[in-house]
Amino acid sequence: MVSGTPAAGTYGTYSYTVTVTDSKGNTATSSNCTLVIAATPIVVTCAATTNGQVGLMYSSGVTATGGTGGYTYALASGTLPAGVTLNPATGVISGTPAAGTYGTYSYTVTVTDSKGNTATSSNCTLVIAATPIVVTCAPTTNGQVGLMYSSGVTATGGTGGYTYALASGTLPTGVTLNPATGVISGTPAAGTYGTYSYTVTVTDSKGNTATSSNCTLVIAANPDRRDLRGHDQRTGRPDV
């Protein structure tokens, strides 16, 4: 009986003969015998890091064990985000996800060893997050009672499709925030001179949110104390 556990790396074809000797010393030798030892099956494991972000470098490797080594890697199904590729020699998936490539990507990878044995991974997943939303205060921070004011809060990042909402603070009477555009506009009413502090929360099309830092709008009184109707800005009453 030929028995035992073939050691790691001993795959291949073995030829041998066996000589048998009986109790009287008689001998005979077998014809040529063959034993073929197969390599262990290839096992392919998905990349361990399954999350990335648009605009930031991503790198994680598909790995393989078993087979005869000398692996090559190829995308068998699915896609990767633009800017991210699979290295066919190492199995490393790396690159910087391009703008707008946020979302969930599913893929499989086939590994081939030096003897042509193949195996394919289970379904792998890579989730690319959008860049964080950044909200910038309206650049024009000064207005005047009785004069039209207009300046916009802006947002970048996220998935677009923004909506804007006043999160804290107030705006002067006559001035409002457009929820679709972020523009703050209107004519400050009589008596609304002063400094206004506020913050704005932006929500993108996927429900991601961010809030601005504290924004300021300074409304000056009309230089002659009267608004366009001739009313005293401090009292709102006709100037007599």
Image: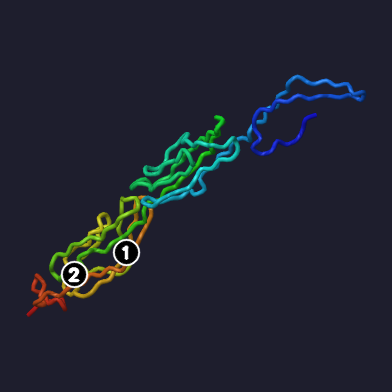
Quadrant where the image shows the N terminus: top right
Which class describes the residues within 10 Å of circle 1: few (<14), some (14-19), or many (20+)?
many
Residue shown at 50% from the left, 42% from the top: 124
* Image coords of residue 103 (percent x, y): 40, 46
* Image coords of residue 184 (percent x, y): 22, 62
* Residue 136 quadrant: bottom left
* Image coords of residue 5 (percent x, y): 73, 36
Q: Which residue is mark 1?
A: 212
What is the three-letter code of the residue carrying label 2?
Asn
What is the three-letter code of the residue carrying label 1?
Ser
User: Helix, strand or loop at disc 1?
Assistant: loop
Residue sitting nearer the eye, 240 or 89: 89
Can residue 146 be seen here? The reply is: yes
For the residues marked 2 and 1, what is the alpha-carbon distance in whole angstroms? 18 Å
Q: Earlier in the sequence, mark 2 or mark 1?
A: 2
Q: Which residue is mark 2?
A: 142
Q: Is residue 77 left or right of residue 66?
A: left
Quadrant where the image shows the C terminus: bottom left
Contact check, label 2 and label 1, Cβ < 8 Å: no
Residue 110 in the image: above or below residue 176 = above
Colour scheme of the picture: rainbow
Count of numbered circles in the view: 2
Q: Is residue 28 left or right of residue 161?
A: right
Residue 132 in the image: above or below residue 146 = above
User: Helix, strand or loop at disc 2?
Assistant: strand
Residue shown at 8% from the left, 73% from the top: 230
Q: Residue furthest bottom?
A: 240
* Residue 165 quadrant: bottom left
Which class describes the residues within 10 Å of circle 2: few (<14), some (14-19), or many (20+)?
some
